[in-house]
């Protein structure tokens, strides 16, 4: 795992536990299934809403908890990059998903359950942030 990947997630107040190479959908597969033209968000948040960082963080964390992305002790996987694959992290009380944006302000955060059954992502689409979810059944990844 590259140091820049580690720093990126640590700056979002995630505890980085290390690379993950277990079973389940790859980063590329998760990206393809969650981020596509016909994607329907589970939740939309206006980009210029007051307290946008808190709203994005809270919306993602609630969806991740309810869908089973978060495992025991708040552990889950996050897409490091296509090269780095999945990185195992732990949610902290100071989660900063909203800080995971690129220089253009686009936010792209893909998280996966350790079992591989669920993905929960956040992206910027026009004037909104979208929280997206996708279920992976055995054999359909």
Image: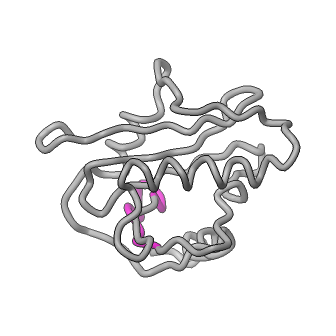
Residue positioned 33% across, 48% down in the render: 118
* Quadrant for the N terminus in the image: bottom left
Looking at the image, how many numbered discs can be counted on the residues?
Answer: 0
> x, y percentage for residue 60?
57, 50
Q: Nearer the viewer, residue 31 or 75?
A: 75
Furthest toward the left, the residue is 139
Q: Is 83 displayed left or right of 132 in the figure?
A: left
Residue positioned 45% across, 57% down in the render: 79
> x, y percentage for residue 28?
36, 45
Which quadrant would residue 43 be assigned to in this image? top right
* Quadrant for the C terminus in the image: top left
* Magenta residue check for 80: yes
Figure check: 114 above or below 123: below
> x, y percentage for residue 55?
72, 48
Figure check: 39 above or below 82: above
Q: Is 58 displayed left or right of 113 in the figure?
A: right
Render colour scheme: one colour
Q: Is 29 displayed left or right of 16 in the figure?
A: left
Magenta: main secondary structure equals strand
Which quadrant would residue 116 be assigned to in this image? bottom left
Residue positioned 66% across, 55% down in the render: 57
> x, y percentage for residue 19?
37, 74
* Magenta residue check for 5: no
Tell me which segment is drawn in magenta.
Answer: 79-89
Which quadrant would residue 138 be assigned to in this image? top left
């Amino acid at each position: 795992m590259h140091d820049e990947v580690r720093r990126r997630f640590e700056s979002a107040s995630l505890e980085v536990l290390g690379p993950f190479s277990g079973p389940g959908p790859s980063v590329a597969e998760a990206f393809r299934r969650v981020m596509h033209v016909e994607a329907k968000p589970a939740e939309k948040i206006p980009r210029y809403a007051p307290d946008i960082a808190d709203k994005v963080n809270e919306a993602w964390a609630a969806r991740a908890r309810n869908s089973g992305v978060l495992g025991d002790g708040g552990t889950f996987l996050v897409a490091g990059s296509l090269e780095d694959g999945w990185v195992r992290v732990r949610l902290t009380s100071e989660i900063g998903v909203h800080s995971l944006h690129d220089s253009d302000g686009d936010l792209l955060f893909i998280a996966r359950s350790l079992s591989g059954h669920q993905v929960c992502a956040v992206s910027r689409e026009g004037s909104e942030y979208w929280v997206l979810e996708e279920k992976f059944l055995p054999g359909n990844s």
